Image (cartoon, grey):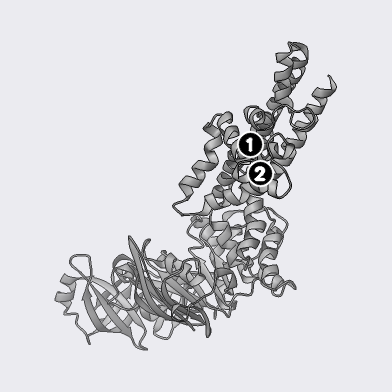
Amino acid sequence: MIEASFQLAYPDFSLDVDLRLPGKGVTALFGHSGCGKTTLLRCVAGLNHAPTGRLTVAGEIWQDEAQGIFLPTHKRPLGLVFQEASLFPHLSVRKNLEYGMKRSGNQAGEGFDASIALLGIRPLLERAPERLSGGERQRVAVARALLTRPRLLLMDEPLAALDLKRKLEILPYLEKLREELDIPVLYVSHAPDEVARLADHLVLLENGRAVASGPLMATLARADLPSTFADDDAGVVLETTVAAHETDGLTRLEFPGGQLYVSYRDKRPGSRLRCRIHASDVSLALAAHGDSSILNTLPATVRTVVPTQTPGHVLAQLALRDGTLLLARITERSRVSLGIAPGLSVVAQVKSVAILA
Amino acid sequence: MDTSSLAAIRLTLELASLVTALLLLVGTPIAWWLSRTRSRWKGPVGAVVALPLVLPPTVLGFYLLLFMGPHGPVGKITSSLGWGALPFSFTGLVVASVFYSLPFVVQPIQNAFEAVGERPLEVAASLRASPWDAFFSVALPLARPGFVTAAILGFAHTIGEFGVVLMIGGNIPGKTQVLSVQIYNHVEAMEYGQAHILAAGMVVFSFLVLLALYGRRQYKGWSR
């Protein structure tokens, strides 16, 4: 469990948060640039000193202004990965890894083999950082942070400086990390897809305030979120299981609320797959039709309908048979003509499913 | 070459080596402070360090003479310690040269520290390096090109000084008679041949130093 409460004021920006975050899994700090997510991360790292603040990680006090406690960064057992490659250019990859190991009392190299295997950097060990690609550098930076055996891993937009190809190359490593790591990770990002793919817990920040904080799927399914994740980026994330590959080139995914057909995925039946369903890809019908080309239809009940920032459009929150939530963006005109209102039984037609892994 | 010229060359090299070593010791903390501080004293301190760039050497020499002379505040202390007055001694020359060449050492190091920036030190802190540790294990190695430039400039500039030496050290053979002063002596005595040897030697030396400096920069840049 991480309890973080910071209040600080700069001339043009102020941060005021009071958060309780899970002690395991990936917590995404999400928001547009200037929302304070990096400042919040730097406060946790001790790189910025909030004049009013309290921070405890797994029961240990890292900052408590009421008691006059403020651990400097180098006394906090944390790992930090910055946006741009931050390897020491005067040291080889191996020496970069050893830099933190030596200073954190990990001379024995506990976890060395596991970490470099996890991040696939064994062939890079003797190279100079300038001879690595951007993605390779970030993988080394993650390994270097892990080898200090941190109790908290902080990542400040680790993929933002990479092009799409490098991003796709490194994301699988981060996913493996999420599965194997037993320490909490704070992950700053402004990319909804990254958050949907990696996070377990979501904190939405706006103007230095946390406007929402909760489990990823439940939080994304909220219809009342402020602008950040709403509108164009509104959508839910589903955790599905690959059920079967069908003969006509489709793969069938199952989740407690039903099943979805997607184009063929090279994944063994039984493996898990995260999907994202955008609200704008979901339309509503009053009854199931056999005469539609839309394959994925899910019976649901309307829970709430709220206006969006786009004129003439509303956002409907639907519950599937098991309670799984879905968001649908429809026009106000359709809402009126179909009589969409809380409690109504509808059929959600899913036009497209974004596979996240 | 006559023996007094050889003695002058030896003395000059000794002086420049010692002064360069002292300058790196004194200049590094000043450069570090100037590159990090947000204090309102940054401007004034930076300006004071840069003063020798614009002041006539005679002005600097004049005040050092007053301060270090038997009746000056520094002179009184050195006298009471039994060291005697510093002017017209090798030690006095060293002290004066350190002041005179300070900006040539501080500025390249300060620029190098500024180019290193805050980030590598933050990374070091996140890897449990204390501020001192991070300074020696990260900031110094990354600022190395700046130190090489600073050492070369400090050394060469000390060799080339004349006005301050005359004011503070005079012209005592084997003690304060350095190369530039020796050239002056030769010219005064109409020994143009002797003057040529030393003067041309200085031209070649200075050219090689600057070639090393600029050639190196082109070759590797501020390697970061």
> Which residue has dot 1 on it?
B217
Q: Secondary structure at mark 2?
A: helix
Q: Residue at x 45, y 67 (%)?
A: A188
Graded by Cα atoms within 10 Å as few (under 14), some (14 to 19) or many (20 or more), the crowding at tag 1 reads: some
Q: Position of residue B13 (x, y in %)?
A: 76, 33
Q: Is residue A330 left or right of residue B66?
A: left
> Where residue B77 sits: x, y (%)?
65, 48
Residue type at the position of mark 1: Arg
Q: As drawn, is A304 to the left or to the right of A275? A: left
Q: Is residue B8 visible?
A: yes
**Which of these two is toward me, B105 or A292?**
B105
Relative to A128, does residue B201 appear above or below in the rendering? above
Residue type beneath disc 2: Leu
In the foreground, B202 or A286: B202
Above or below, A260 against B2 in this view is below
Among numbered discs 1 and 2, the one appearing first in the sequence: 2
> Residue at the spot x=55%, y=29% of the render?
B56
Residue drawn at point x = 62 percent, y = 71 percent = A146
Q: Quadrant of residue B124?
A: bottom right
Q: If the image is split into quadrants, where does the N terminus of chain B sit? A: top right
Q: Which mark is residue B148?
A: none
Q: Which residue is mark 2?
A: B23
Q: Nearer the viewer, residue B17 or B110?
A: B17
